[in-house]
Image (cartoon, rainbow, N blue to C red):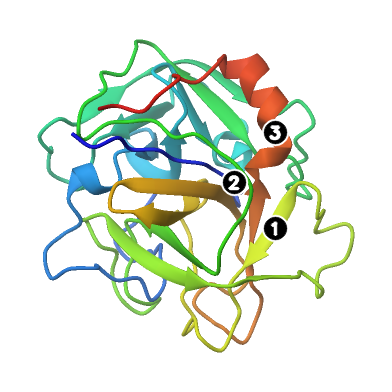
Amino acid sequence: MNRITFFIFLVAAAPAESLSDGEVRISNGFNSNPTPVPAEKYPFVVSVALNDNHICGGFIYNSRFIVTAASCVYGKTTSQIQVTVGQLSLILPDPGEQRLQLRAIIPHEAYNHTTRFNDIAMLETSQALEFSPNVNYTLYNVVSGSLAIITGWGAFDESKAISTKLREARVYSPINCELFPADVFDQNTMFCWGQTEYDDGIRPCQYDEGSPLFYQTSQTSYYAMGIVSKNLGCGDSDIYETIYTRLSAYYGWMTRTGGLQPSFAME
């Protein structure tokens, strides 16, 4: 198998409740092919569930830790939260899917649930993940490029039911968050993406919080830049862009909390 390498910027998410059939996630999302996204295409993507209902996304940091938004797990206990890796369908089991309970929920110590500053958390699993073509981890670096990818189990738009299959959407252009006041946006720990004439209103939506935003450099290489934190007017390109948690700002915290990442990706 080719080496899979990922570099990530994190963005935190808005608070999430249990999923209902009428909710959506990636607004204006789409499959890149007529067939569903294959599990091995994005082996780092994680579903975070509250009492067995998907509420947020996340990504694999190493064999024992998942990264997601602190707002996704705020006030929750390890008995309430579960994570699933190698998952495509929310209703049917997938080959290679691994569902794990948690040993610990570790939000950033400076997380503020009102402002969503420092909206990042690490979830320690009760047992080690088994890496495979469908399950792999990511590394992280700085925001780069003008085209990025966001994944989730969302609908094409807010008027339609959710997809039970993992979907991907492409969003364009990093931009300045000039419309946000200082008590909403911190450029050192957050960044914005989207809100251009080219992105056609594609936005993460409810239950996409915690999902990684990443870009592709080759067929099997992805560099994640952030995780979804704040969505104001998802699916409406005339309102606000999405705010993401900037992973590179939390390198020291992630290393102290989750340890080192593997030195190389799964072959």
Say if mark 1 contacts mark 3, CB within 8 Å: no
Query: Which residue position holds label 1?
Result: 191
Of 112 and 95, nearer the camera is 95
Percent of width and height locating residue 133: 20, 33
Percent of width and height locating residue 184: 81, 59
Q: What amino acid type should be assigned to the residue bearing mark 2?
A: Phe
Element under disc 2:
loop
Q: Residue 9 carries which label?
A: 2
Percent of width and height locating residue 40: 21, 42
Quarter of the image that includes the N terminus:
top left
Instruction: Please tell me whether residue 73 is drawn above or below residue 145 in the rendered image.
Output: above
In space, the residues marked 2 and 1 are separated at their CA atoms by: 9 Å
Q: What amino acid type should be assigned to the residue bearing mark 1?
A: Phe
Of 249 and 100, nearer the camera is 249
Q: Which residue is drawn at 64% across and 72% down?
A: 241
Relative side of 202 to 188, left or right: left
Disc 2 or 1, which lies upstream in sequence? 2
In space, the residues marked 3 and 2 are separated at their CA atoms by: 9 Å
Q: Residue at x 63, y 20 (%)?
A: 255
Instruction: Please tell me whether residue 143 is drawn above or below residue 198 in the rendered image.
Output: above
Image quadrant assignment for residue 159 = bottom left
Image quadrant assignment for residue 135 = top left
Say if mark 2 contacts mark 1, CB within 8 Å: yes
Element under disc 1:
strand
Instruction: Please tell me whether residue 107 is drawn above or below residue 224 in the rendered image.
Output: above
Q: Residue 250 carries which label?
A: 3
